[in-house]
Amino acid sequence: MRSTLRTGMALTVTFLLFLAFNLVWISKLPDIRWDFSQHKTHTLSAAVQQMLATLESPVDLYYFNSNNDPKRTHAVQRYSKRIEDLLKEYEKAANGMVNLHVIEPAPFSEDAYKARLSGLDDNAGFLGLIGTRAGHGVRRIGSFSVDRESLLEYEIGHLLHKLQHPERPVVALLSGLALDDSAGRLLQELRREFDLVHLEPTAAPVPEHIRTLMLVHPQALPERTLYWIEQFVLRGGKLMMFIDPLSEHRSNATPVNTRLDELLAAWGIRMPADKLVVDALYTPWETPGKPNQMRLNLPRPAMNTNDISTWNLNRVTVSSSGALLRLNKGRTSFTPLLQSSEQSFLLDADSLTGASTFESLIERATNQEQRQVIAARIEGPSYSVFPEGLREQPPGLQKAAQIHVVVVADTDLLMDKVSHPAPDGNPLFVLNTLDNLSAPDTLAAIRPHVPPRTAPTVLESMRGVAKQAYRAKASELERRLQRTEQEWQRLSPWTTALGTQAVDTTTQLQALNKERLRLPMELHALEREAYAQVRRLELAIALMVTFAIPLMLCLIAWVVFVGHRRRRLQAASLAQ
């Protein structure tokens, strides 16, 4: 009895000591967390921590997250939790400068009304962020997207920077083309987002207070201006340059500058003169059977989704664009931003002569397996192509350890005639890039979290081979199907008559309907043939994974059964 009493008293005292320890000392213990993720996705980068250390005034962040929305996928649910965890890390690392408020707005609640009033997107439940700073307005991230997960730190950092520095960045514009009439929509957007300064083509050195420069069609600028542009880049200025092998809006002035190719070579790139990109996949067929030979509609797969320039961007339209090639001996890093599809090649500008010729060019492009770079980000060391300076000018800077230039091999994308009026089109690409170039070093240093590339597996290699085999045979059928659909829609327009309608049974429509039925069947057969080996391997892997554990359990059970049977036989033999 006494032993039981002593045991009970000991347990009670131990429990009371445990409670006292948790109540008194647990809050004083250091908060230790370990990030075991492969790419340290739950740890703030050094650039983010440095930016948070420079915050001057407290900000409030309101994170709206509709956790229980039925339209939300599992991937979005996981991503919403990751955003919340990351925002808590921001609050913790900011030492009181960031106050986080996590809000789960219920339907038809006051929180939902405030979120909608602030412009947050609720198509699949709220997943956005609102930032406020006392006396300095409000900024928002309307909706976080899983597709932009690699840019998450930059998105949040950009919002914090704009809350601290709401003034518009200064951007200078120097153009060899007349943009006032032909690119009015873009200029309006630039003046709204930036303090836009226009520089004359014959201007002296770029003013010292200019840190970001937008340069258009430098082929039409004098050599003296090109020299000052080079010196601007060497001293640390950020440049976005638009060049074009065949500008549809070129000025009447004859190009006088012949050293642009040397300047590009100093940056580690070149653009073949009079070479245009022809793309069988991205060329728009705006009228049945007639392609728009000069234009390319670049969708999301044609963009580098891990770069700030393509932030919220869905489509870019270029016209008579060139291609950027990296020099083998170049020391700069070359990051493609916009690319053509694999069904593209470079063509002499003089070879575009009519739709019939273009048909043969498209057929030739389908046999290509190389993407052409239309826009790229250049970073790294560079040297001067004017080592002796210019006349009456002493030699300037000779080299730089780090330059930052974005080159676009097309000027026509700036024009209203080519640019689509949608808010997620050409102007957004220019605005994103200039905003990133004009950002301070603390924000620009925040780089996307891009997982390192690994060697492809056997299955991935087989999928790549199957894709190439399918594309080589299916491209012509896909083009024929597209033209057939367009011709069918032209001959069978949608009518708004009430009641029943007569079916057009003309011979031409019957033939088109047969093509619309036959071509998808042929494409499906080609796909099955090309991916036959891949699907057999996938089936074998699925079967192996499915039956591996049951077979292993059966094997273990068989071994145990054999062991027991052997012991029983031995025991029976000993008993005899």
Image (spheres, helix red, strand yellow):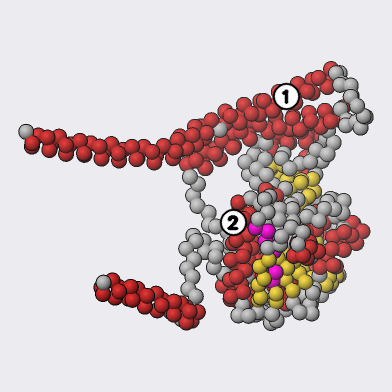
Residue tagged 1: 517
Crowding at mark 2 (Cα within 10 Å: few <14, some 14-19, many 20+): few
Residue shown at 26% from the left, 75% from the top:
2
Towards the viewer: 310 or 44 = 44
Badge 1 amino acid? Leu
* Residue 413 located left or right of residue 407: right
The secondary structure type at the circle numbered 1 is helix
Residue 403 on the magenta span = no
Residue 495, relative to residue 155: is it above or below? above
Assign the magenta stretch its main secondary structure: strand
Q: Where in the figure is residue 171, as x and y percent of width and height?
A: 79, 70
Q: Residue at x 69, y 82 (%)?
A: 56
Real-space Cα separation, disc 2 to disc 1, in angstroms: 42 Å
Marks 2, 1: nearer the viewer: 2
Q: Which residues are magenta?
A: 61-67
Q: Is residue 553 left or right of residue 486?
A: left
What's the residue type where badge 2 is placed? Arg
Question: How many callouts does the rendering have?
Answer: 2
